[in-house]
Image (cartoon, rainbow, N blue to C red):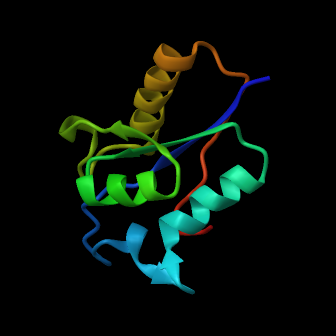
Amino acid sequence: MKVVAIILARGGSKGLPNKNILQFCGKPLLGWTIEHCFSGGIDDVFLSSDSDEILAVGEEYGARLIKRPDSISNDSSSSESGWLHGLDFVEDLLGPVDWVFAPQVTSP
């Protein structure tokens, strides 16, 4: 069984800039989320972002990176479009997967 997580972390937060990589109890929020995915038995964790800074943090914690295009990375873009783009990327790389989890960075 192939189990993956696709984490969406856009870089353009207006209310709280860089919220996805803000420090919380000694590590970035994104780091907590990635670690929880791996400790919960998820085989591969993919991070989809338009931000090179966020992608770099994700890579430090072992996530596989998906550079999200600007066309689905703006204030009016839906999460669904990000997940579908991510799933296409994952299945092109790994083939079909059995389970996909979509954890939220801001509530690890």
* Spot occupied by residue 81 in the image (x, y as percentages of width and height): 40, 34
Give me the residue at 45% from left, 32% from top: 86
Given residues 46 and 72, the one toward you in this image is 46
- Residue 57: quadrant of the picture: bottom left
Given residues 71 and 2, the one toward you in this image is 2
Given residues 76 and 108, the one toward you in this image is 108
* Spot occupied by residue 100 in the image (x, y as percentages of width and height): 65, 34
- Residue 77: quadrant of the picture: top left
Q: How many marks?
A: 0
Give me the residue at 59% from left, 61% from top: 33
Q: Farthest residue to the left: give it.
A: 70
Give me the residue at 28% from left, 38% from top: 72
| Quarter of the rendering occupied by the N terminus | top right
* Spot occupied by residue 99 in the image (x, y as percentages of width and height): 72, 30
Q: Is residue 42 left or right of residue 59?
A: right
* Spot occupied by residue 95 in the image (x, y as percentages of width and height): 58, 13
- From this view, report whether residue 22 is shown above or below residue 20: below
- From this view, report whether residue 40 is shown above or below residue 84: below
Give me the residue at 66% from left, 21% from top: 97
